[in-house]
Image (cartoon, grey):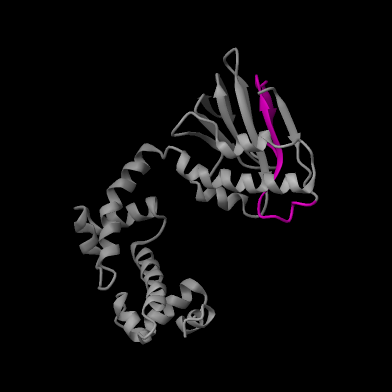
Amino acid sequence: MESKIIFCQTEDTNMLPLYATTIGFWEHQAETLRPTGFPDYQIHQIHEGKGELVIQEKRYIVGSGDVFCLFPNITHSYAPISSKWKLSWISFNGREAGQMLLYAGIRESGPAKLKEDNWLNPLKEMLSLSESNELETNLERSKQLYALLLDLKSNLVSPLNEALELERIKPVLHHIESNLHRALPLKELAEVIAVSPQYLCRLFQKTIHDRPVTYINKQRINLSKQLMFNERDKKMYEIAQLVGFENASYFCLVFKRLTGMSPEQFKQLHGLD
């Protein structure tokens, strides 16, 4: 692929949750200095060679199989340290840009490693589209950008500690899923993986980003929705008991807090009365 840069017309797409502003590929990326940062989010994928990335005085060596993300208006620079440094990139914005990166596990500017040293398909697809700025082409770029951010979640290598902690907590998640019909004391959950209740709470916060009780309540409410569909003859207090709530009033309170509506409103909304 030859070097190229596409400046995307955003007048018709800037109301979308995500939209691309530039897309490009360099056969050899030159030194780039941005003391005041860049106005949009950026994702760069490195295909060949190595470079030095500096983000607010933190220095990283990045090479083939790496990506690096840059948040808006963050001081940064990058430069090649090999004879060839091939990069593709996309810059983008939109009201959901930050949340989509958070979903992928990216919380700040910095490098990350891909599980496989292959092109990110949506990025390659965007580079193969027509370079025109017709609305149809820019809408397709937004679709591919959404796919790219979704794919990042499964394509990125999790930090070693986080991956180990997530693997360690999986038996607890399976235990919860199998026992939603009854009370699940924190002490019992901790014993599943032989840790203290306090340590289990820390594990949940680091891996699930929720307290155990909040996670359990979310799973109970999700199960209750399915039961409302599958067992429509059940009374609400029976549904509450089946998902581990002894008190139907508390079940309704939690349901509304998590969904914004009462169980009755949910049933009516989905035609389950």
Q: Quadrant of residue 56?
A: top right
Q: Residue 249: x, y in percent?
A: 38, 85
Q: Please say whether residue 203 is one of the residues in the magenta stretch.
A: no
Q: Residue at x 38, y 51 (%)?
A: 207
Magenta highlight: main SS: loop
17 horizontally vs 109: left or right: right
29 horizontally vs 260: left or right: right
Q: How many marks?
A: 0
Instruction: Check the image and report above or below for 196 versus 24.
Output: below
Residue 114 shows in the view: yes
Residue 56 shows in the view: no
Q: Residue 216: x, y in percent?
A: 34, 66
Q: Nearer the viewer, residue 124 or 49?
A: 124
**Bounds of the magenta span?**
12-39
Instruction: Check the image and report above or below for 37 versus 49.
Output: below
Q: Nearer the viewer, residue 203 or 158?
A: 158
Q: Quadrant of residue 254?
A: bottom left
Q: Residue at x 22, y 63 (%)?
A: 187
